Image: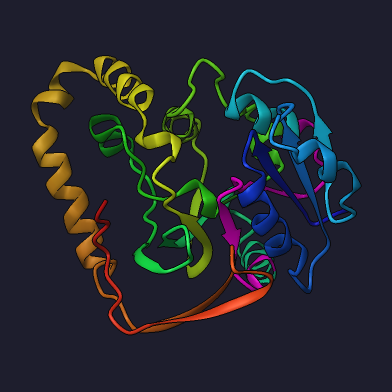
Amino acid sequence: MIRFSIVTPSFRSGRWLKLCIPSVADQEGVTFEHIVQDSCSDDETALWLPGDPRVTAFIEKDSGMYDAVNRGFRHAQGELLAYINCDEQYLPGVLRKVSDYFDIHPEVDALIADCIVVDSDGNYKCERKSMIPQLSHTQVGTTLSFLTAALFLRRRVLEKHQLFFDTHWRDLGDVEWTMRAIRAGIRFGVLRQFTTIFTDTGENMNLLPNARREKEELHSKVPWWLRVTAPLWVIHYRLRRLFAGVYRCKPHDYAIYTPDSAGERKLFHVDKPTFRWTR
């Protein structure tokens, strides 16, 4: 059986997809398939994607990103599942590390890891270290304690719990999914390793007006007593991050594909890492 199925939803993002694909293709030590669900892009993606031997491409209309991810998951054959957007990349050797973690921790259903945030040229902006999500904070903040680019699932999360994304949501489906996962008793684990690059292109979906509207919709469903005590949950979350060492950042290197180095990974050194994400 294939160890990993990686799904990438795609729509008019061919420029970034050409960097995402090699970051999956050069993973070593595990078997995997890379499924690209493209929603009939009109940016010439359909001209080259079906002929790329590194991926299994499905070009069909969908009702949004989360529908595309669901479609990809239903095509998937792997034991472990993940989705990575076109403007995201895996760092070298991370699928092997994730696989080893799941082998050592058979009780874990979902694994979250750490991300590096870069700009459109691959330059470092900040880093995001993951925390196991808690329902109260997720509800009052309508934000996640991890980036989904560094989320990995066992197949049983879908087969046993039917935890597919709710396609009602266009931008914050991952937040709603996380709340359902917590309620379903999904056991999360944390791999304190950088596994993934998130590119802040300035056009990311969670920064657009619809995301703000959906945040208001999610917040309206929060019990009144949680809304009243929201500042306490925010403080509690920040204390959790403090005691977990999330705010401690050390110099490090990372290697990724960039617009000016699409054929091989380009090495970056970070002298002054930070957890602060400035727009």
Name the residue located 85 percent from the left edge and 56 percent from the top edge: 54
Q: Is residue 273 above or below residue 14?
A: below
Q: In this orientation, does residue 160 appear?
A: no
Q: Is residue 138 left or right of residue 48?
A: left
Q: Is residue 221 magenta?
A: no
Q: Is residue 227 left or right of residue 18?
A: left
The answer to whether residue 198 is left or right of residue 110 is left
Q: Which residues are magenta?
A: 73-95
Foreground residue among 38 and 236: 38
Of 168 and 130, which appears nearest the observer?
Answer: 168
Task: Indicate the position of residue 68 as horizontal and vertical percent values.
Answer: 67, 29
Q: Is residue 76 magenta?
A: yes
Q: Is residue 82 above or below residue 251?
A: above
Number of numbered discs overlaid on the protein picture: 0
Q: How far across and how far down the image is residue 105, in percent?
A: 60, 62
Q: As drawn, is 202 to the left or to the right of 57?
A: left
Answer with the quarter of the image where residue 240 lies. Answer: bottom left
272 relative to 88, above or below: below
Query: Residue 37's x, y, as percent?
Result: 74, 35
| Quadrant hosting residue 24 | bottom right
Identify the residue at image location x=67%, y=45%: 14
